Amino acid sequence: MSFNLSLIKTLGRWALAVLTSIITTFIGLYGDPFAVGQEVDCGLQDVAAWQTQLTQPSEEASPAYVLRVTEGFLNACPGRPETREARRIAAMAAVDLDDADRALSHFGEALPLPTLQAQFYYAATLLAAGEHDEAWAVRDDMIESWSRKVKRNRAVTLDKATVPGGRVYRLTYQAGEHDGDFRMAFVAVPHDGGWPATVTLGADRQITAFHRLRAGPEAKPLRHIDLYRCRGRRLLARTDKALSLEETRLAAETSLTAYLANPDTEFGADGTISPCLWPERLLPGPPR
């Protein structure tokens, strides 16, 4: 079993999503005169009880626990509108237990998946189940959805170029107020099978703060170029010198061209499922 702590770290966000769903459902039921009196198999108190089990667990909040209490909710309340979110949570817990069949049964009822993490989990599960074409189709849909979202944000300019072995998206960010804001990112997507890989140019606020403790408060931020792959990260360069667009582009294209010649297609071994580790780094959005 490959225990993935990312599942547990997102419990708070899941609980918020569930609470939002509760409020939306309440307003929907009582704001529509035709909906009042509709019969449901469970009430809001049952949803709240499930939420409490996730946020205030009675035992270690392991993937097995999350899966057990969520499937208990699904079995007891199959007609609730929150079940799609519950299916997503159950599917991701099953992935962390390396149970591909169980995960796929839940993913099938949770589509469309609202988060990058869930979409990467889904694609990895399909790969582990031997459904390679379906997995890369999920990847392509994910890339398309991500690119549409990025294009809608005025703080980012997105360009796309076709290169040998795939395509590369270039994201150029408007100058931010903080040293830690990303300035550029390059995302490579293989034409055929393979996970995306990304080169980012940015400045880590914490590293820059330590640098200024040594070099003085007027020191320039430490900029770094990083290569992110599905399950690995490599520092390509770090400097306090200004990097030109051409220097950044050359470093990114050199690394990504080599990557596209032999992209990551890993999907675990011996029945394990291996989702990518940095979904929001592989497909970055605007600085937060």
Image (cartoon, grey):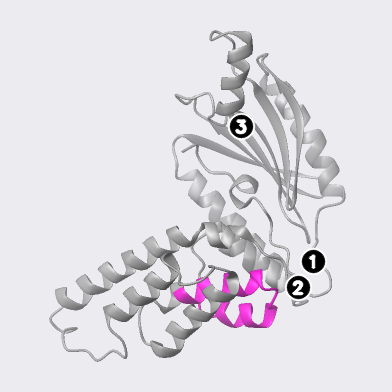
In which quarter of the view is residue 79 placed?
bottom left
Task: Tell me: 283 left or right of 36.
Answer: right
Q: Position of residue 282 (x, y in %)?
A: 65, 48
Question: Where does residue 131 sit, x and y in percent of width and height?
Answer: 74, 76
- What's drawn in magenta, residue-wise? 86-110
- Checking the image for residue 216, the label placed there is none
First-in-chain label (3 vs 2)? 2
Q: Mark 2 and mark 1 in contact (Cβ < 8 Å)?
A: yes
Q: Earlier in the sequence, mark 1 or mark 2?
A: 2
* Disc 1 secondary structure class: loop
Q: Is residue 270 left or right of residue 46?
A: right
Q: Looking at the image, which residue is at 58% across and 14% down?
A: 213
Q: Residue at x 74, y 22 (%)?
A: 247
Residue at x 49% of width, y 50% of height: 149
Query: Can you say whether 56 is above or below 255 in the image?
Result: below
Question: Percent position (x, y) of residue 222?
Answer: 64, 20
Q: Which residue is mark 2?
A: 128
In this rendering, does residue 123 appear at all?
yes
The disc at residue 184 is 3
Asked whether 96 falls inside the magenta stretch, the response is yes
Helix, strand or loop for the magenta stretch, by majority = helix
